[in-house]
Amino acid sequence: MDRNNATALVIKDFGSVKIHSFVAPYAFAANATHIIETSNELVIIDTQFITPLAKAFKSYADSLGKPINRVFISHGHPDHYFGLASAFSNCKAWSLKAVNKIIAVWGPQMIKNQKPSFGDLIPDEVIIPQFVVTPGTEEVIDGLSYTYEAVESAESELQLLIKLPELGVVIAQDLVYSGVHLWLGMGWFEKWTVELKKLAQTDGYDYILAGHGMPATKDEIHNNLRYISTAQRLFEEGLEADVFKSKLLEAYPHRESPMMFDLYLGFLFGKMDSH
Ligand SMILES: [Zn+2]
């Protein structure tokens, strides 16, 4: 038994379709990866950050006994694509054209940056998704419809948003943080707010797969909106990074993964460059 290293597994059962969410421990930012299981195949969403978790996620996928049709990578942040190299290198991977480019350009540097802290916990090289998803299109995979959208300048420069209209499921990944502190490295508070409001107003979707934390309902979108608004106010007060952190922690004492601040304060306060 190990409370701090416990992963979570949530299964939403739609009968002929099951959605499995594999969520990393809070200490590892609660990275959430998902499997869409249809009658004959699996579709994977994101791949975890550290190698042991990527491998555990892959073992779980293998235990379902169905072939992996593909892996979707939601965006170009390493906590979502490092696992592609460490555990899913035999799979075909897809993302938006510009996300694939971001991974190609930034990936090797990300490995270099993270190696001193994580060593063998991360791969030695990245794998760039080989296939391109076109936003504004729809596709049927093993009998289930997937619609593809691109979201710009929210949590990251660009991300893939996938909806499963027949199930009322939106694969929001890092557009929505569930129960954990948000990664605010880009500081695009207003643009992120616009995208969250758009999602909140989209009817017919009541199961939200977040990129960090447990699957959520639309209520979590409103929690995120309030959080971003508080963060923006504090940031615009011109506080030092550590004061900003302590005030936001004070405002949200019940959100998990406070280590998120260590992952983004250097970017938000302009000491490091991100995308
Ligand atoms: Zn993330």
Image (spheres, grey):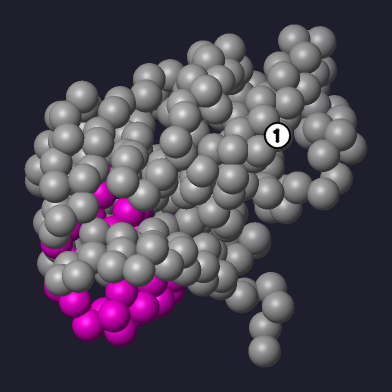
The secondary structure type at the circle numbered 1 is helix
Q: Check disc 1 and report the residue beneath it.
A: 223
Tell me the residue at 14%/47% (across/down): 140
Q: Nearer the viewer, residue 96 or 162?
A: 162
Residues packed near mark 1 inside 10 Å, few (<14), some (14 to 19) or many (20 plus)? some
Tell me the residue at 30%/26% (across/down): 150
In the rendering, at what x and y percent does residue 90 appear? 13, 67
Identify the image quadrant of the N terminus.
Answer: bottom right
Q: Amino acid at mark 1?
A: Asn
Identify the image quadrant of the C terminus.
Answer: top left
Q: Which residues are magenta?
A: 44-73
Residue 74 showing in the rendered view: no
Residue 126 showing in the rendered view: yes
Q: Is residue 102 above or below residue 4?
A: above
Magenta-span inclusion, residue 57: yes
In the rendering, at what x and y percent does residue 32 appear? 48, 56
How many tags in the picture?
A: 1
Magenta-span inclusion, residue 130: no
Q: Is residue 131 above or below residue 85?
A: above
Q: Is residue 95 above or below residue 14?
A: above
